[in-house]
Amino acid sequence: MIRVGVIGYGYWGPVVARNFRGTDGCELVAVCDKSPSLLERARKNCPGVQVTCDAAEVVGSPNIDAVAVITPVWTHFELAKAALENGKHVFVEKPFTSTAAQAEQLIELALSKNLQIMVDHTFLFTGAVRKIRQLIDDGTLGKLYYYDSTRVNLGLFQHDVNVIWDLAPHDLSIVDHVTAETPEFVVATGQTHLNGFEDLAYITIYFTGKMLAHINVNWLSPVKVRTTLIGGEKKMLVWNDLDADEKIKVYDKGAEIKNGSGVYDLLVSYRSGDMWAPKIEQTEALAAEAKYFVHCVSNNVKPFNDGAAGLRVVRMLEAAEKSLKQRGTPVRV
Amino acid sequence: MIRVGVIGYGYWGPVVARNFRGTDGCELVAVCDKSPSLLERARKNCPGVQVTCDAAEVVGSPNIDAVAVITPVWTHFELAKAALENGKHVFVEKPFTSTAAQAEQLIELALSKNLQIMVDHTFLFTGAVRKIRQLIDDGTLGKLYYYDSTRVNLGLFQHDVNVIWDLAPHDLSIVDHVTAETPEFVVATGQTHLNGFEDLAYITIYFTGKMLAHINVNWLSPVKVRTTLIGGEKKMLVWNDLDADEKIKVYDKGAEIKNGSGVYDLLVSYRSGDMWAPKIEQTEALAAEAKYFVHCVSNNVKPFNDGAAGLRVVRMLEAAEKSLKQRGTPVRV
Amino acid sequence: MIRVGVIGYGYWGPVVARNFRGTDGCELVAVCDKSPSLLERARKNCPGVQVTCDAAEVVGSPNIDAVAVITPVWTHFELAKAALENGKHVFVEKPFTSTAAQAEQLIELALSKNLQIMVDHTFLFTGAVRKIRQLIDDGTLGKLYYYDSTRVNLGLFQHDVNVIWDLAPHDLSIVDHVTAETPEFVVATGQTHLNGFEDLAYITIYFTGKMLAHINVNWLSPVKVRTTLIGGEKKMLVWNDLDADEKIKVYDKGAEIKNGSGVYDLLVSYRSGDMWAPKIEQTEALAAEAKYFVHCVSNNVKPFNDGAAGLRVVRMLEAAEKSLKQRGTPVRV
Amino acid sequence: MIRVGVIGYGYWGPVVARNFRGTDGCELVAVCDKSPSLLERARKNCPGVQVTCDAAEVVGSPNIDAVAVITPVWTHFELAKAALENGKHVFVEKPFTSTAAQAEQLIELALSKNLQIMVDHTFLFTGAVRKIRQLIDDGTLGKLYYYDSTRVNLGLFQHDVNVIWDLAPHDLSIVDHVTAETPEFVVATGQTHLNGFEDLAYITIYFTGKMLAHINVNWLSPVKVRTTLIGGEKKMLVWNDLDADEKIKVYDKGAEIKNGSGVYDLLVSYRSGDMWAPKIEQTEALAAEAKYFVHCVSNNVKPFNDGAAGLRVVRMLEAAEKSLKQRGTPVRV
């Protein structure tokens, strides 16, 4: 039985707490937040669970095996470090840390203590991303040309980070998960219109193997869009996460070069066949992730969304931030 | 009566020829192409019109007042130059020229000869773009935050230019037309997968006044998308050019900063009201443009889509090309 | 303080119970169901509330002011009757009763005891239906030509009633609510493919004033559709209840007859203007309804969705059922 | 070489004429219309073709092998009869005739003269309907439960027939073509709001084998809808004719009855799998139909859309009309 304490009970904390409560082999034993009203809410929602405003009580408790850090990103490092130092496994909300250096330190610490770090890249546990990963792994899409995501809507403005740190970790963790290619250069452009943080931004990542990722994030869009195009040599895919029934459509479409008779004749031929929308599992992603966390901790297995995965995402965020400050100058990852 | 000769009878030439034929005050007198099969087609479609494979016959004809250059971009300069030198007004397909220097030379030449240049930025004559322009001019949208366009589909690969020179002129001419801001820096990223020319690319343009334009062009998309989001301080707009009935939707949505009680309290408040889809005129854009060309030539009026407008677009294309070759390094326009 | 007991804790009962719990001036004091597992669930969800398998305990309890009957339709009459006889106000799930005669008896009983009946026509409390009602009441739509609803999806098959009794009450209660016209004839067609009850059906209702209502209900559709077209003399409206953001679109479209010069010249002229999607309130309908129930009971006010409204719907259902059994023969309401 | 004369040059006539002109083995030799302005248009569009206002010249011409009757429905019988009597094959716009008796007389006449009748059920030649037919024929859909079509938009009001005779022939010919079942009863409801002809109507057809067809036609809809749901025992299908790229979607969805342990336990189990959008041929339907007409006439082959097919549609229309006049009373076909 893994005893879990959750630090942070704002927007995402209650969802994490509820899922750990509902997971076999796991017990929610403590919830912590600094806000009295949120603590009141925790008390009401989680009868029988210790509720405290002092994070030290959670990271230091002898009755706790693992700590979920669901707080603003700038606090992740200190809280996760304290937990690891006290011999707790950690589950950390995305993005993992504010800097790559912090992430490296936590990874080393966990290794030395033989503890697990899991970074909450929730999307990796959705039916949609699992299906995309499968279609890439089994060769259906073929060599990847690009991953192009649009993730825009009105708000919710964050007060401590810009739109890249808020929304892009989703796509960065997904693209990191589904491809074997390595990021080489990051280019980010954007603008700040309202609260001093960039509220819209565009990120291009050059990967090895000529794969290109592009991420469009925007807090100032009148409409909500969650659409990703993935182009492969053999098939192409559209993932519309807002489509309740047909989230993923696989197109038997493509183009290829054929040599014409003359030396300069590079002819492009097109293929356009059926479309296919595979059935997507409907299970709650976080429930699957919580179960996987319990499995990894219980069996001392390193999760695929471990500290190293979190670090890879933070490195791309850092590079994007640096490029953004220089109006798009490419930054090597 | 303006007598027009059309050079180039491939994809767009027949459409241009048909529209000049259908325009009052204008007579189509010659069509020129190098391809015998296209000439045959011209002969069938345009009874009574001179058909020739020699462009010199058109640009040098004493019976022609204006020449429409509807040929590959690398030929625009020589053909337009010859036409102007022979005292003809010119109508040139987009993009105007291959380089800014060429455009400047043509503009100067036309000026010295008191001739008109019109660059075929057809989209400016659509009901949709006219409505957008109006909504910006009359203050409905307020100060512009961004113009974000996605213009992707499968093919048609060009054999002499990349996807930026093929598709981006549309958006560049539109954004140039609807805003009074001036471009400062261009950042372009992209990749070439098939025929040696970039087949997908992303362009960011930093304008004065913090306005940002972003253009996503892609020949390798499984689906056709023609969607532009325009964010303004007062209202936001979505233009879906593929929607037959509701091309433009105006959203009474937005966010604004309100000072909270404390010095650090920059609160963002949101507004979400009605949506409104104004009726869009359905007339054929090129017909309106041809009529406007005849008007400008007949009355010696400088069109708004004149050589200078074409030059502004070419400057952005050149900057984008330069940035693209340096993996996104920002290039001053 | 109105003390409420809820009978029936299957699919809808928990939602009703939760909403009464959350309503000011109201206390949930008892929950009843015959199923031990559902009672267990009730115990978990509603701490401090009496949980019983005996409906007689609820309808006869001296500590209860109002009874919510959320059970299969064939049990509504007996339970509501017992509650009214014991001096309780009743809140009854739709459809009100199995027969018009039962409904009339309950109405009379409530009247004689000065008790309120509210029939749970939840849709009337949605922002969408409230907006539609407003657009009709204020004359925006003009005289109504038709109400045409499609309400189809895969399942959920009911085991005691056909698809008409399951899905059509929604539309029948809405059309009854938004128009002042009176139903005259009902025509229903349909077919039974699986479990002996009609799984798809089509209902036409002839109202006074030439208004026509048509309802398409189907348990065997591969896609979920919840779309209603309402045609008025002045404006037309599309209500797509599955559209998260633009549920209602009002079209400035129409046609009208103009007399031509000759006696036989009845010319139809068309009008096609802007479209407008008014903002719709997002509050939970059942919460508003529960609040209204408490208001009506506390202040002895007859609700607009009273027994008479329930009876009008049942009469249309009865007529539809009768017509359906005769393959569409029109039945006078 | 089949020499064709076209009578009627209004909306559809020019399209028919153009397609016969473009068909191998066929020559357009005459066009006839009573309107001088339409004749003028015919002269311009069809150089070298005889143009006349006198239908007798066409049906009686010794230089004509086949006559296309593209006139108002009430004139079909007389024109087709005259053409057949003069030994011409006939191609008749839908609906075939105004009455079943007329259709029977024409069929008999053609038989006695060994001439072909083709009724222009154009939709049967579209890629979409051909694909649907194939999916039914090869057993993909399984036994059909229903065919449910919505065909609505604003206008175009006809001046001589109601909306059923205008729009329903499309669906009636399709359902007749794709199923082997036989219509038994027709129920039609509707209303007339503007010009004295029903402008919206709903038709239900009971076929053998429990198959149900339903057709929703409306001239007073603010939006254009062309959507058909087809439910089969094995698969279900949605055909959205307005979707440029994915007209047909096949759903691996369904429900089936399973006997539970008890005698009353008829359990419904659901299946929900992948969706699949087969590629649809994009060829112009009328071009394929014209080619088929030439083939049938040249080789003395009876077309599948012959007079008998036209008659079956007219019988359903007659029954619908009769039912409509009696407010939905079922009429045996």
Image: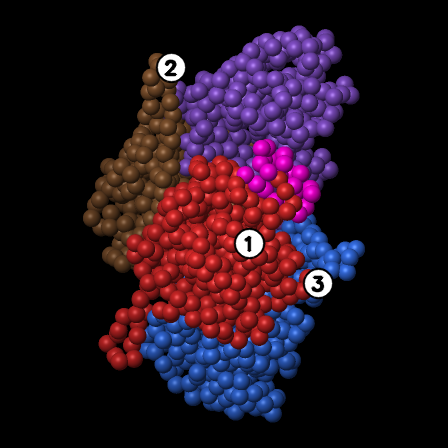
Chain colours: A blue, B red, C brown, D purple
Q: Are marks 2 and 3 in contact (CB under 8 Å)?
A: no
Other residues around mark 1 within 10 Å, as few (<14) / some (14–19) / many (≥20): some
In front: mark 2 or mark 3?
A: 2
| SS at mark 1 in the image | helix
Q: Residue at x 71, y 14 (%)?
A: D115
Q: Amino acid at mark 1?
A: Ala
Q: Amino acid at mark 2?
A: Tyr
Q: Amino acid at mark 3?
A: Gly
Q: Are marks 1 and 2 on the same chain?
A: no
Can residue C134 be seen here? The reply is: yes
Can residue C186 be seen here? The reply is: no
What residue did someone put label 1 on?
Answer: B82
Other residues around mark 3 within 10 Å, as few (<14) / some (14–19) / many (≥20): some
Outermost residue toward the left? Answer: C299
On residue A142, which mark appears?
A: 3
What residue did someone put label 2 on?
Answer: C264
**Residue B31 is one of the magenta-drawn residues:** yes
**Magenta-colored span:** B29-50
As measured in the structure, the alpha-carbon distance from the residue carrying label 1 to the one carrying label 2 is 63 Å
Splitting the image into 4 quarters, where does residue C259 fall? top left
**Residue C152 is one of the magenta-drawn residues:** no
